[in-house]
Every structure is written in structure tokens, then in C-alpha cells.
Image (cartoon, rainbow, N blue to C red):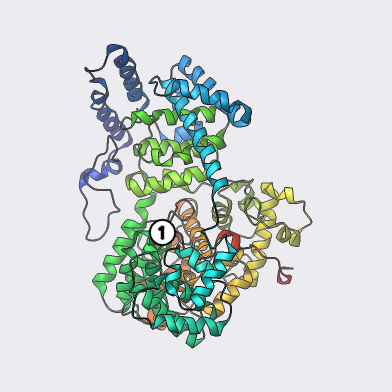
Amino acid sequence: MPSVLFDAEEPVKPPGDGIKFPRQNYKMSVLPKSSSRTLYVLSLATVPMMFLTSATLEASRARPRVAAASENVRMAMPHDLIETAEKGSVGLDFDEPQFRQKALQVGARYLQVRRSPRLRDSFEKECAKTAGQETRLDQLKAVYCQSEADRLRKSDVSQDSSPNLDPRRNSSLRRDLAEQLRSQNWNAVADITYPAVVNVVSGFKDKTELLNLGRALSKKSACTGSKAATAFAYKIEEHFPDDEAVQISRALYDYASGCGTDFAAAKASYRLALLDIWQNRCDRVPRLMSKVEQVAEASQFNSRAKYWSAYCSEVLGQKDASREARESLRADHAMSFHNLAANGQRGEAIDWITRDTDAPIAFRSLVRPENNALLIAIEVLVKLKAVELAADLTDRNFAVVQQFEPEVRLYLAALMHKHNQALAKFKILSSLFRDSPRLVSKATMKLYFPLWFFDITGPTSGSTLDPLLVTALIRQESAFNTRARSRVGARGLMQLMPATARMMKRVRTNKLFEPETNIALGTQYLRKRLAQYDGDVELTLAAYNAGFSRVDEWKRRYPTDNRILFLDLIPFKETREYVSSILRNYYWYTKLYGKDPVVALQRSSSHSTTPAARDVASDNFDLTSTFQAITRAQSGLVTALHKAGAAVPAVMHAAESASAEDDDATVSDIVRPEPDSSAN
């Protein structure tokens, strides 16, 4: 929803070649701080009338609404982002003392109920009494009542959910469906989800059987097995680079790509396009990637689809199409891995993101005053030092948060930042940057990429690793949560497995939750692995996530000198996003706090190009030099490497946003980092 003060006909997009935008969209960036604040205040004066004109209501009900509206206007006055973040000010601090005291009492009661289940019955009765009441305190109580009801309901649903219809949780059903596929009854899996089909097909281990079934399915004329075709093609990739396996996998992807508009068909189009590029065939890649972008469930691939469309259009000599794809990539995925790979060497395409502009915040919403009770509920929990519950309440009501004005959402992000609730903050900022690019600035980017724990990772730590690279990894691994623990048992900031930590030092498992211990052992382990891969940061990061034996297998499976293609071919969605997210993080950390990565990326390029890439000589699209410079970092162990201060981003909402479920391995399938003798 547009802001009260900065309504514009179209969303602000980064200025660029051949694209003009309405000047009014740039009020924030062209006005000095004092002028933008004045504009903000003046615009507020026109809003209260929508709340203060209610002649048809009884006077006894109108008065509190008028008071609430006046309070909203006062609380919506602009405040400085940096000052608010540093002080940790909340809207409740500016409220009437009597209301503030009663609100804290309501919050304390809610915390009692959360800590003592025996109080739930009495709390439910209290909730019933306040239902439908219109005072601010009653609305505050209603937020807590709804939150507790939703939490208990979610718990009940989780306990009652049945695995009977999900082959991933029902081994008998999985075996039955596998037998149906062996008998070439492709329709047997038509009505189950695509990830479930992948799970069924994953049980096919015999190469000959796989290839025979794949060959038979690829020759069907009727579109009856598109999900099965994509799943079998994906499974057959395990036998690459065997020529027959490549041929059958491509035929299956081709069949599925033409058989539907669902996620399985989009995934087939995407993988087929990558395999075309792998074999130096660009002719149909733009068309295939266009099909991917037309499927909403496949939005996770969009930035990659645009990148490879630009790449192949350039190879084919279609300069206008390539430029259009890159402009679309820059406009729609400005901070993504693939935008930096395509446009990172063009300062005008990147520098607007770290501009010095004023970004005011607001404590209350004027557009959605009925939801201000949620803001107060979050503030109360912060005041009561229940910051994790405050972050949880924010996340549970994220759909409501997104309805607030951008200035209010930025306030919530600053509040989460002050109290070290990184995941909630990242989620808010991710959607905010997408919806309101005018609020992207150096100040807001530093909220998104904070230098937490830099006193441990920084230059004084004695580590030879670039501290910004370590910080970029921590941001992705644990979101700076010292108590983070994965489902497979990885612990702490750098998500170390206990067995991995003990390869470096005898240490108690609980010590891995201590930042100093975790970072010391994590950086030691990372240095060892960087040495194992001759300082190759991208491969090391992939191995840190998925295991080194898997990365070696993928190198065997997808032999290519085109590194970005190799990263996109990685079959684990988690690992693809992990590597590109850390490289993205590292780029922006160096951009915000270190040397200019654009200068560094002009200096180093170590990998040769594929035959197709050699044809790309345009200064505007030098893929190899851009990517390699972005991804080479100093390991401290390989003296021949330059200390390049750059890297790249993935789809901006990788860890912070939900995308369509992929067919790739889940977190529970990945054991990382895996201990082996080579680390000693």
C-alpha cells in the first residue's frame, strides 16, 4: 500500500539507461533532510479528517475514536532512523504514562500465561470478555488473545496431521507408487505434489532401470506424466556426464516443459535451458526462460532466468534483447546474485542502493489505525525484555505488518535490529526494499547487513581470513543467533557440528554456543577447507554447506569452466541459495564497510571461459571477469591470490522469504560440515 506521504503513480526503480521515471518518485532523494521532514509533517495534516468525521456514531463512541486518531497523528510524526535504532526508542515511550503502565500490565499477564499453561482457562475467559471492545487496552488484549489462540491451534494441527497421503512420510505408499511407475502407470503420481514425486523417484537406484523408464516416458505423445518426467530427469542427472544419461534427461525435460504450466513444467524448462548452455547451445534458452518466468510457483528461478536470457541473447548477437533482460534484472532483482554478475561492473546500476538519503520512520500507522494495537503489543514485549516473543509476534502477523506504511515497517525493522532479532528484521526489510525502493539507502542497508560480532571476527582477531567474508557467512548460517541449532545438530554462529569442532580442538559441545569459541574454530575449519580447494571460495562455501564429497561429485557430474553455471546446476536448492547468499552478503559488506568491490573486480580473473562465453566480448557484459573478481577472496593461505573485496547476491528473499517448494534436498538431507581425514 502506498505511503501516506509519498504516493506515486509507479514504484520507484533505479535510474538507468533509457528509462525515465516520474520526478515526484524521487522526493526522498532530492530533498534535504529538513525539507523531507517538512513534507512528511504537512502531509499528515490532511489525514486525520478521515478519522475525525463520524457524525453518525454516538457521541460516547466517537470521543475515544477522535482521541485515538489524534494520538495516531502525533505518533506518526517523523523520527530519525539512526537515532531511533541507537536509542531503541519505541512508540510506547511517547504515550500517556497511565496508558503505558496499564499496557505493560496486560503484557505481563500474557507472559504469565505463556509460561504457565494452567492459566490458559482463565485467560480464555478474560479474552471472551474483551472481545469486540474498542478501547486501546481491549484491542491490545485482543492481539495477545489471538496470538495465543493461533499458537495453540497450530500446535493441534501439527499433532493431528496424518502422513497417510504423503509418500514422504508413508513408506508403504511410497513403495506402491514406485511399483506403479515401474509398470509405466505415470498417472499414478498425477495428483500428488511434485516434491513427493521426487521422493518416490529417489528410491530408484539401478541406472539401467532408470534409463529404460526415462526413455519410455520421453517417447510418450500424450502429456500424462510431466511430474514424473521432471523427477526422473532430475534423478538421471546423478549419472552425468554419461552421454546416454544426458540425452535421456534432456529428452525428459523437453517432454515435461511442453506438457504444462505448473511448477514441474517450469522446473523442466529451467533445467533444460541450463543443460543447453552447458552444451554451448543458446538458441532456445531465452524462450525456455520466458516460460519459467510465466509460472508464479517458480518465482525462485526468476533472477536466474533473466540472467541466462541476457547471457544467451548476448551470445546470439541479440544486443537489444540482452540489454532488456539486464535492465529487467536490475529493476526487479537489484540486490540479487545474478544482477551483480550481469550489472555489477556498472556503477550507475549499483550505487543508487547505497545512496545517502534520509529515511524517516513512524511509530504508528494512519492508513491502518485498526492495526496499531499490534505495534503496541510488540513494543510492550520489548519493554518487558521478551524480545524473542516480540519477534515471534511480528512474524506471526507478517501479513498485517506488510499493510503498514513503509515508514512504520522501517520502524519495526529498526526495533528488531536494536534487540538483535535478525530474522524478523531481515524479513521485514526484504519485503520493504521490494515494495518501496525509495527507502533503500546506506543507512537502511546497514540495518540489513549489520557488523555484529565484528569485535571477534575483525582485523584484531588474528585470523588471516577477510573478516567481512566471515561476517557474511555468519549472517547466512545463523542470522547472528548465538543459540542457533540446526536439525542435524550444527551449533552456534558458524553452525559447527560437534565432530567437526573436535577436529580442531577438544571442546565441550555447549561451548560451541559461545561466540568466541565458535568463531575461532569455525574460521580455523574454513581456512583448512580453503586450502583444500586452493583458495576457491565458491567451492569451499558449497562444501561447508553440503559436504566436500558432494561438491567433488558435482564437479565430476557437471564439468565446466563457467563457474556461475556450475553454481546454478548444483542440485541442492539449499546449497545453491546458501552459496549465492553468502557471496551477495560479502559484496554488500565490502560495499558498505570496505573497499569498493567494483575496483577489485577489474583486477582479477582466473578461470577460462566456455566456448560460448568467449564470444561475449562486450564491455557491458563481461561475464567471466565480473563473476570471477566478485568471487575471489583472500584465504590467507594462497599467496598467489589477490585480496578481492567483492562477491555477489542471490535472490534477495532466499533466507528471508518463502518460495515455491523445490524438488531438491531439504535441510535434513544435508549433513554439514562433514568430518573426514583430509581436514586433519
- Residue 480 position within the rendered picture, expressed as x and y whole percent measured from the top left: 58, 47
Residue at 31%, 63% (x, y): give it. 294
* Amino acid at pointer 1: Ser
> Quick one: 588 or 663, which is closer to the camera?
663
Mark 1 closeness class: few <14, some 14–19, many ≥20 residues within 10 Å: many
Tag 1, which secondary structure? loop
Check disc 1 and report the residue beneath it: 336
- Residue 365 position within the rendered picture, expressed as x and y whole percent measured from the top left: 35, 31
Of the 4 image quadrants, the one containing the C terminus is bottom right
- Residue 225 position within the rendered picture, expressed as x and y whole percent measured from the top left: 40, 73
The furthest residue to the top: 60
Query: Taking 40 as reference, is 133 left or right?
Result: right
Q: Quadrant of residue 70?
A: top left
Query: Taking 306 as reference, is 489 left or right?
Result: right
User: Where is 236 relative to 402, above or below?
Assistant: below
User: Where is 345 relative to 91, above or below?
Assistant: below
User: Where is 257 relative to 336, above or below?
Assistant: below
> Quick one: 118 or 493, which is closer to the camera?
118
Q: Quadrant of residue 625?
A: bottom left
Q: Is residue 107 visible?
A: no
Of the 4 image quadrants, the one containing the N terminus is top left
Residue at 41%, 21% (x, y): give it. 136
> Quick one: 414 or 282, which is closer to the camera?
282
Q: Is residue 513 visible?
A: yes
The furthest residue to the right: 506
Query: Taking 453 as reference, is 561 left or right?
Result: left
User: Where is 160 relative to 312, above or below?
Assistant: above
